Image (spheres, rainbow, N blue to C red):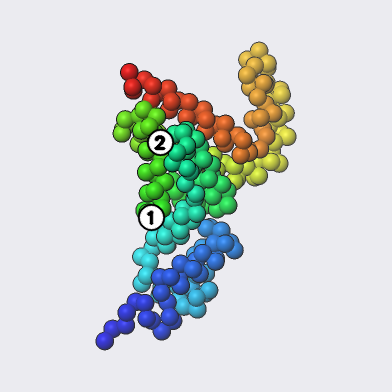
Amino acid sequence: MAESPDTTATGLTHERIVDAASDLIAAEGFRGLSMRKLGDRLGCAAMSLYRYFATKEELLSVLADQLVAEIELPDREAAWDTRIIEYFVNVEQLFQRHPELAEISTRQHLNSTSAFRGVEMVLGALREAGLDSEQAVSAWYALTFFTAGFSYRRATEHADRDRDGGRRRRIGALPREEFEHFHEIAAMYTGGLSDRDFESALRVVLAGVATLGKESRR
């Protein structure tokens, strides 16, 4: 009689693999996860893991879905824009804890019930703002990719810190008559991104949503 995939000699199960992968990611980040390292941690050959997960991406999707479950949903009684702001602030904070998750979320859909609850909440808030179904989907993608892009840039901006001095000097050398507005925002443009920057930018996006919602109601 053939052995069940969950009763192999190594004692592998989906749960054991996911738990070990979570520990590995906590120690080395998503980019540190490889099937070889995971196999070493579990005391098995990397090929054994493919009996449970067809690809590394499939395993990453499961891990990402688990992390998304950490996102706290806002109070349903709050205003539509407040709900959206609170939700995406929570998402951005999760991305800061796990920067690679932002990249994963742009490459593939997350298919857990927790992820769907977030989508449902945001779509409901967007419909409440006056958007029709098609507009709400477009706004969802805009908000999602904006958040992922902002988070990715924020997580990697430390690599540019050493170049900030040179960037400031180059901006300072630009002729003011041609680059008036650039000179006005030079300090902000070359400074680091913050939670406040994210929320301010998010409010700009939602101002456009509010305007579109008013137009749709006419």
Kind of residue sitting beneath label 2 = Ala
Pointer 1 with pointer 2, Cβ within 8 A: no
**Nearer to us in this view, 102 or 209:** 209
Q: Is 80 drawn above or below residue 28 in the view shown? A: above
Residue at image position (31%, 34%) is 133
Q: Which residue is mark 1?
A: 112
Q: Would residue 175 appear left or right of 78 to someone viewing this image?
A: right
**Mark 1: secondary structure:** loop
> Of marks 1 and 2, which one's residue comes earlier in the chain?
1
Residue at image position (48%, 29%) is 205
**Nearer to us in this view, 174 or 161:** 161
**Mark 2: secondary structure:** helix
Q: Quadrant of residue 80?
A: top left
- Name the outermost residue toward the left: 1
Q: Would residue 129 appear left or right of 25 to someone viewing this image?
A: left
x then y, percent, for residue 212:
39, 24
**Nearer to us in this view, 30 or 14:** 14
Q: Disc 1 versus disc 2: distance between alpha carbons?
A: 20 Å
Residue at image position (64%, 30%) is 189
Q: Which residue is mark 2?
A: 125
Kind of residue sitting beneath label 1 = Ser
Q: Is 43 drawn above or below residue 169 in the view shown? A: below
x then y, percent, for residue 155:
59, 46
x then y, percent, for residue 2:
28, 83
Q: Quadrant of the C terminus?
A: top left
Q: Quadrant of the N terminus?
A: bottom left
